[in-house]
C-alpha cells in the first residue's frame, strides 16, 4: 500500500477528542503499553477518579505473558506508583471488544452497585490502541448510546505504528484495511454502531481488494 493511502486510513481510524473530566478512564487491552501509560497520565491530571483495564488474551495480545489487563496493571504499578491500587479495576477474561464492555459492566457492578454504566458512570475516557479507537467507540456506543464517550488514544503517528507492528512481525497496512472492513461489516451483525465511510477510504479499500485478488 502506498504510504499516502495508509496515512488516510490511519487518520480515519485514529479518533481523538480533547481530554475532559469523566467518571472513568477505560483502557482497552493490547500489547501496546502506551495504552496504560495514557490512562495513568489522564488519572494524574485529575480527569477521572478511577481506571478500568479490560482485556484477557486476544488478537492484540501478541507476546504478552499475562492477560492484557494484568499486564497493564503491572505496568502502571511500576510507572505510576502514585495511583492507589484501589483506584484500578481489572477485567481480564474478555477476548474481544464486545466482551470488554459486557464483562467490564460486571466488574463495575461487583465493585459497587452504583457503578453501572449509565448510573455513576456517565462519562468515560476511552483509551485504545490508535487504529482500534474508532471501533472501540462504535462498540461502546452500540451498547450504551447515552454515555458521553471521550476518545483519548495514545499519542502516535502512522509511521510509529508501522514500526511497532513490524517489530511484532505484523503488517500494519493489512491490519488497518481489515479494521475498516470490520467497521463496514459489523453493524449488520449488531456488534457496533453504523457510520458512513468516507468515499476516499472506500476507494482505497476497494483498490486494495483488487490488488490482493
Image (cartoon, rainbow, N blue to C red):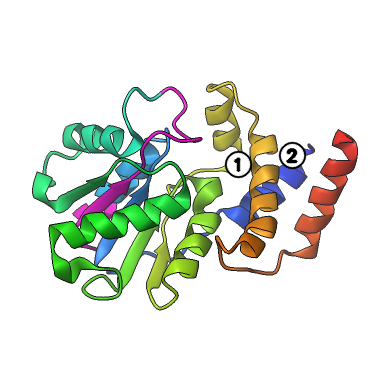
Q: Is residue 45 visible?
A: no
> Magenta includes 211?
no
Task: Please tell me whether residue 23 is drawn above or below residue 183 in the rendered image.
Answer: below
The location of residue 93, given as percent across then percent down, is 33, 41
Q: Relative to residue 164, is residue 196 drawn left or right?
A: right
Q: Relative to residue 3, is residue 20 drawn left or right?
A: left
Q: Which mark is residue 3?
A: 2
Image quadrant of residue 98?
bottom left
Which comes sooner in the sequence, label 1 or label 2?
Answer: 2
Give the residues in magenta.
41-63
Q: Which mark is residue 126?
A: none
The location of residue 123, given as percent across then percent down, is 31, 71
> 113 or 140, which lies in front?
113
- Provide the residue designation for mark 1: 158
The location of residue 154, given as percent across then percent down, is 42, 47
Q: Residues within 10 Å of mark 1 (few under 14, many from 20)?
A: many
Amino acid at each position: 500500500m502506498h504510504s499516502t493511502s495508509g496515512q488516510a486510513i490511519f487518520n480515519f481510524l485514529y479518533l481523538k477528542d480533547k481530554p475532559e473530566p469523566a467518571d472513568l478512564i477505560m483502557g482497552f487491552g493490547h500489547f501496546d503499553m502506551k495504552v496504560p501509560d495514557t490512562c495513568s497520565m489522564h488519572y494524574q491530571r485529575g480527569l477521572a477518579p478511577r481506571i478500568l483495564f479490560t482485556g484477557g488474551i486476544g488478537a492484540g495480545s501478541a507476546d504478552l505473558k499475562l492477560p492484557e489487563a494484568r499486564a497493564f496493571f503491572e505496568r502502571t504499578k511500576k510507572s505510576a506508583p502514585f495511583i492507589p491500587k484501589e483506584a484500578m479495576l481489572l477485567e481480564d477474561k474478555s477476548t474481544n471488544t464486545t466482551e470488554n464492555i459486557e464483562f467490564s459492566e460486571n466488574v463495575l457492578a461487583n465493585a459497587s452497585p452504583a457503578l453501572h454504566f449509565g448510573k455513576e458512570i456517565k462519562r468515560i475516557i476511552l483509551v485504545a490502541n490508535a487504529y482500534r479507537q474508532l471501533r472501540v467507540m462504535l462498540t461502546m456506543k452500540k451498547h450504551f448510546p447515552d454515555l458521553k464517550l471521550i476518545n483519548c488514544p495514545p499519542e502516535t503517528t502512522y509511521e510509529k505504528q508501522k514500526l511497532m507492528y513490524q517489530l511484532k512481525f505484523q503488517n500494519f497496512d493489512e491490519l488497518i484495511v481489515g479494521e475498516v472492513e470490520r467497521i463496514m461489516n459489523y453493524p449488520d451483525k449488531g456488534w457496533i454502531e453504523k457510520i458512513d465511510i468516507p468515499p476516499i477510504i472506500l476507494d482505497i479499500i476497494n483498490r486494495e481488494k483488487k490488488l490482493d485478488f
